[in-house]
């Protein structure tokens, strides 16, 4: 069985791919499972292969497409993937030990759960880590709670960069939202409307902080672009909820 790790990479983050790869190599998966790493270069001149310590690892699958932003790159990586589970890993982030095993175990054992997220630590430029509060209670996150939280705060209750999700749910939603940022939040809120999720209290991601990351852009958290992104995220989630509400016999999507 395959877990597909999808990674979008642009020229500003390619230098971190080696650390991401080493964190994947260090993962111990449950018996019968393996991972593939679907890297999608956002642009035709990224050359991620030269940044990998072992570019000939047969588990690495590199593709490239015209510059379209992270949503396009992730969706293109997904299109090339083969796994029954899809794991997001940003090019500049790293996975602590045990992260993939915990996610696979939940999605194997909990048939009604469609996706998982987990606790995050920021990875600071000096190599230290820092946490922050506000995590939900561990375990089941009933359908709709993440979207409800987002509607009142305009921020995700859990970190979308930690998402692990069943393949059929990503296919159903057509991949990541076609917006210049917050595409992962858009996917997470829609998934919350469709299916129960699960929050893992263990740290499952070190989220690197650096000046080249897209979240540093001035339009990321304010302005007309931000407002439009928030509106379309909410509009899609509301439309999905209304569609499901009108069909009581199929009012949620089973995990499998």
Image: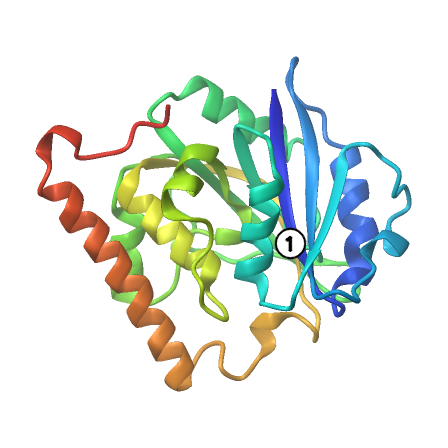
Q: Nearer the viewer, residue 57 or 67?
A: 67
| As drawn, 228 above or below 196 | below
Mark 1: which secondary structure? loop
| As drawn, 25 above or below 158 | above
74 vs 141, left or right, is right
- What colour scheme governs how the chains and residues are painted in the rendered image of this protein? rainbow
Residue depicted at x 89% and y 38%: 56
Residue depicted at x 71% and y 56%: 64
Q: Nearer the viewer, residue 2 or 213?
A: 2
193 vs 1, left or right, is left
Mark 1 lies on residue: 90
Q: Position of residue 207 (x, y in %)?
A: 64, 56
User: Residue 30 falls in which quadrant of the image?
Assistant: top right
Residue 222 visible in the shown view: yes
**Count of numbered circles on the image:** 1
Q: Quadrant of the N terminus?
A: top right
Q: Position of residue 115 (x, y in %)?
A: 43, 36
Q: Position of residue 187 (x, y in %)?
A: 41, 52
176 vs 241, left or right, is right
Residue depicted at x 52% and y 58%: 132
Q: Quadrant of the C terminus?
A: top left
Residue neighbourhood size for the residue with mark 1, other residues' Cα within 10 Å, grouped as few (<14), some (14–19), many (≥20)? many
Residue depicted at x 31% and y 67%: 232
Residue 88 visible in the shown view: no
Q: Position of residue 108 (x, y in %)?
A: 48, 20
């Amino acid at each position: 069985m395959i877990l597909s790790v999808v990674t979008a990479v642009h020229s500003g983050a390619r230098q971190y791919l080696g650390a991401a790869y080493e964190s994947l190599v260090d993962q111990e998966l449950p018996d019968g499972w393996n991972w593939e790493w679907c890297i999608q270069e956002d642009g035709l001149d990224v050359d991620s292969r030269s940044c990998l310590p072992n570019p000939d690892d047969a588990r690495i699958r590199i593709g490239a497409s015209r510059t379209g932003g992270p949503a396009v790159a992730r969706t293109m990586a997904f299109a090339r993937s083969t796994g029954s589970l899809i794991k997001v890993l940003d090019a500049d982030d790293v996975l602590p030990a045990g992260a993939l095993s915990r996610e696979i175990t939940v999605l194997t054992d909990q048939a009604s759960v469609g996706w998982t997220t987990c606790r995050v630590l920021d990875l600071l430029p000096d190599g230290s880590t820092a946490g922050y509060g506000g995590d939900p209670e561990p375990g089941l996150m009933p359908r709709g709670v993440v979207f409800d939280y987002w509607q009142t705060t305009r921020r995700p209750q859990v970190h979308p960069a930690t998402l692990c999700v069943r393949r059929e749910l990503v296919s159903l939603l057509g991949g990541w939202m076609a917006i210049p940022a917050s595409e992962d939040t858009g996917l997470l809120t829609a998934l919350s409307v469709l299916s129960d999720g699960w929050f893992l209290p263990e740290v499952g991601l070190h989220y690197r902080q650096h000046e080249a990351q897209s979240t540093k852009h001035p339009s990321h958290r304010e302005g007309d672009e931000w407002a439009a992104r928030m509106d379309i995220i909410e509009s899609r989630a509301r439309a999905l909820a209304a569609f499901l509400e009108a069909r009581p016999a199929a009012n949620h999507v089973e995990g499998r």
